[in-house]
Image (cartoon, helix red, strand yellow):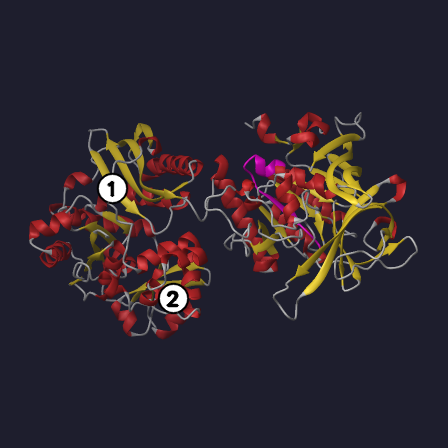
Amino acid sequence: MAERTACLWCPDWPVVALRARDPALCDAAVAVVARGERGLVVIAASTEAAAEGVTSGLRRREAEARCPGLAVAEADPQVEARAFERVARAVETFTPRFVLEEPGRISFPTRGPSRYFGGDTAMAIRCLDAVHHIGITDARIGVADGGFAAKLAARVAEPGAAYVVPPGESPGFLAPWPVAVLEDPEPGEAAELADLLVRLGLPTLGAFAALPDGAVLGRFGSAGARAHRLARGDDEATAPPGPPPPELIETAELDPPAVHVETAAFAAKALAERVMARLGALGLACTRVMIEAETERGERLTRCWRHEGALTPAALAARVRWQLEGWLTADAGGADADVGSVDELATSGLVLLRLVPDEVLPATGRQLGFWGGDPAAADRAARVLARVQGMLGHPAVVTAVPQGGRTPGERVRWVPWGDPREPARPLEAVAAPGANIREIPPWPGAIPAPAPARVFDPPPPAELLDAAGEVVTVSGRGDPSAPPARLRCAALPDRGGEIAAWAGPWAHDARWWDRRARARRAYWQVLVAAPDGERVACLVAVTAGHAALEAIYD
Amino acid sequence: MVLAGERVLAVPGPLGELLPGGAVQRGTVVAVDGDPGAGATSVALQLAAAATAAGEWAAAIELDASLGGLAAGETGVALERFAVVRRVPPARWAAVTAALLDGISVVLAEVPAYARVGDTRRLLARARERGAVLVAMGPWPAEAALRLRADGSVWRGLDPGAGVLAERDQRVHVDGRGAAARDHVALVEAG
């Protein structure tokens, strides 16, 4: 059962933060843009701009065309995070166990505060009052079982009001939502998953949730299984923070004490990379991190940040930086020092920074620093491969995935780079659960190792001749007409030569289940004489009397 | 400061014993050549395996699509860190190779028959600048720190009408600084 969670959401937070910095914009139509794949697109718009038809996802130029006089500003996550620190402090008067998800959204478990204030609704109204008091009027709260449902509940709440999903009713609340809500804030795997589900005829979370667990895991992998748990309202994300594994904690002492954000952020960046390298070496990913700092005067500051999906080193460093802005920049406290605890603002330089990976999961999808590899090298490799895919098209860059089959060509599936590395056929017809990949025997009838280093697609035509110069045929029972004596093929040195040794034929029914594509094929392994007394080892396939050079053991 | 281990890429196994210092220099070109069937591809794959064994990344550029993925795995290449760019148009070959050298430690590139010398010089400079190893497969018209020529193999296990290919002794000729005295050393590869 997912933990009862509240989610406080301030819509269009970038606009709120911008207006807090520049009060002249308070009554103007404002849009905040960010650089995305399509250039500058709107990520947040004020109500005045929205009334003119400016919506998120619109390109800057279109937005300006729809709403003349629109004030456009580029997003600045640091300013947004700094401004949000005020809201964090207001929420802190209710519960210390809150988690920052992004600037504009906080979630916290409601068990303690709701009991104290007399129910979820009463607690939510108190909380909204406190946020209203610091000048945030259109915040809303959703309360539900699990963080995912709470986030969606906040989306349907009226401005300045709460939407409470009664306990146990989260699955029913989630069911009518479109699967697109599974998307991460940074589109990636989940966006593809949502797209695929719609095409499979599963447009809503309810339809997706009705699928059996095992089938989802088998078809969509671990990312799909996680999305399926979310869709069912079984949200593992807001598990109560237990004691963090002590060996994962990384600490940096700052000497001299850091008074400026830049100095502290510099140390924090190295710290974030160390944490991620340590996690990567253990095959773990982190979804929630506790940022702790100590000041010269012995104050201890703590904040918890959460991220949908695993944190990358860059995302972690950004969050630490945002938090340092909140602590070290005086204007974050501002006029609302009466609300919230003043001691959350550092009164002197920071002497110690500590990152505590608070919620770690086994890394399944993008395992970057595998085998102690350098995560920065993985980032660089991913970037250049994406650039080549941009030049030649997505399917031009591939990676080999071993799979079941009999011939060298069948036993490898070439998957476009970045797609899930999943075999199309199991490595073994009946795979024992948990079997080690090295212990899995090859398919019966598979051509034994070593594998040829060149496998041709399409195979060049060849001629397999016997001692009398006749083409060697293979009968339906797999018997050859005569032993092969000569192989001729344009791809071989000297266009082929005498056969010094051979094995086969191995008869092989290709695609016997398919009436049109079925073919009987016979394979020969041959050693062909080349100039200077060399020998070339090849694999020859004979289909309906036509031989072809399938592979060379180069 | 650059550590000695960062300037070279250690090559494990029998191929490493043939190379000067048991390693290839980062930032250089290794030219690998040989007739079809003589084993040039296997030699190149061992260099890719050296990169992935060190936790780094490798990639291959092919003008067709014939590299054996299974053979790569058997040679010891960690396939999840080995990307293959297939059917590269010869006109874009140099641009693709240059892009890969930017972020990948060992790049195996099949060289088109009429590669421009200017392009190959530029790639040489790019590899040096990025500290990557460019393994040029086929005729390489520019200079190379190491030239490896596959000279053929002796296969064991296959007889007329019996057995299967099981073991190979591969001969590789190494030419380059620190390797002038070596010639035709057997590389044993058990199947």
Q: Are marks 2 and 1 on the same chain?
A: yes
Examine the structure image and report whether residue B60 is included in the region drawn in magenta.
Answer: yes
Residue A346: image quadrant is top left
Examine the structure image and report whether residue B103 is included in the region drawn in magenta.
Answer: no
CA distance for labels 2 and 1:
35 Å
Q: Which residues are magenta?
A: B50-63
Residue corresponding to mark 1: A241
B146 left or right, relative to A391: right
Q: How far across and how far down the image is residue A106, in percent?
A: 24, 52
- Name the secondary structure under disc 2: loop
Which residue is rendered at x = 83% and y = 44% of the image? B160
Q: Amino acid at mark 2?
A: Gly
Given residues B183 and A81, the one toward you in this image is B183
Q: Chain of mark 2?
A: A
Given residues A481 and B185, the one toward you in this image is A481
Q: Chain of mark 1?
A: A
- Name the secondary structure under disc 1: loop
Residue corresponding to mark 2: A57
- Confirm whether residue B36 shows in the render: no
Q: Residues within 10 Å of mark 2 (few under 14, many from 20)?
A: some
Q: How far across and how far down the image is residue A224, in percent?
A: 40, 56
Which residue is rendered at x = 79% and y = 52% of the image? B114
